[in-house]
Amino acid sequence: MAVFIDTHCHLDAPEFGTEMATIRARAAARNVALCVIPAVAATNFATVRELAHAQNDAYALGIHPMCTIEARDEHLTLLDAELAARRDDPRLVAVGEIGLDFFVPGLDPDKQERFFHTQLQLARKHGLPVIIHVRRSVDKVLKHLRQVAPGQTWRGIAHAFNGSAQQAQACIDCGLKLGFGGAVTFERALQLRRLAATLPLAS
């Protein structure tokens, strides 16, 4: 019997409301043994940690690129402190969700890159994998990965990947696994579906 891990599930999102426990139980019934619940801002660091412990799941701590609008530099300091404080917590499995989003209007690209770069440095400092948001930003994401750890590989996931075959291979060469989100189910997403079908399962 196959057992699955959901590497990216925002179970703390208010949209789930009172249905969250039911949804998690439904996933468990379909052999999803573990969900990784990534934080998106300093304000939900405690929430994802507590939820992961309550449900025997895992969590990640980070600042999402879409949350950099409200984020302040002291939140990066807080993230560093939280990662240090939870270093012995077996349920803390990554720094995430971090990354770059050049699709959503109104986001400051320079601030996104500064927050992303610093969080990559924190992941290295604390020896943790990364969960990376890569919406229309694969090449810039790769640039920062190479700058922070020249010639070294990473552990982590390029979440909801939607790039080219060449970009996919570059991510794999950096050590990342590729995650395909709901877009791969869209009938018009022919290129993405071909890519998902041709890449090795270990990617």
Image: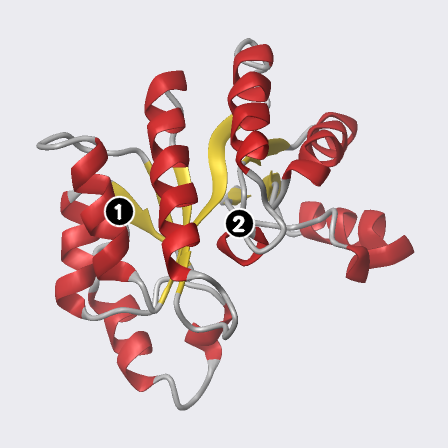
Residue closer to the observer: 46 or 30:
46
* Earlier residue among tags 1 and 2: 2
Up the image or down, 127 lies above or below 72; here it is: above
The answer to whether 93 appears left or right of 169 in the picture is right
Q: Can residue 12 be seen in this view?
A: yes
The answer to which quarter of the image holds residue 160 is bottom left
What residue would you read off at disc 2? 64
Up the image or down, 108 lies above or below 143; here it is: below
Marker count (numbered):
2
Residue closer to the observer: 60 or 58:
60
User: Which residue is at a point 61% across and 41% down the rendered structure image?
Assistant: 39
The answer to whether 159 appears left or right of 18 in the picture is left
Please provide percent x and percent y for residue 62: 53, 37
User: Which residue is at a point 19% across and 49% down the rendered structure image?
Assistant: 143
Give amino acid for label 2. Answer: His
Please provide percent x and percent y for residue 60: 55, 34
What residue would you read off at disc 1? 202
User: Which residue is at a point 21% across and 55% down the rendered structure image?
Assistant: 200
Mark 2 Cα shell of 10 Å, populated few (<14), some (14-19), many (≥20): many
The answer to which quarter of the image holds residue 33 is top right
- In this rendering, the label closer to the viewer, 1 or 2: 2
Element under label 1?
loop
Residue closer to the observer: 71 or 197:
71
Element under label 2?
loop
User: Which residue is at a point 23% across and 41% down the rendered structure image?
Assistant: 145
Mark 1 Cα shell of 10 Å, populated few (<14), some (14-19), many (≥20): few
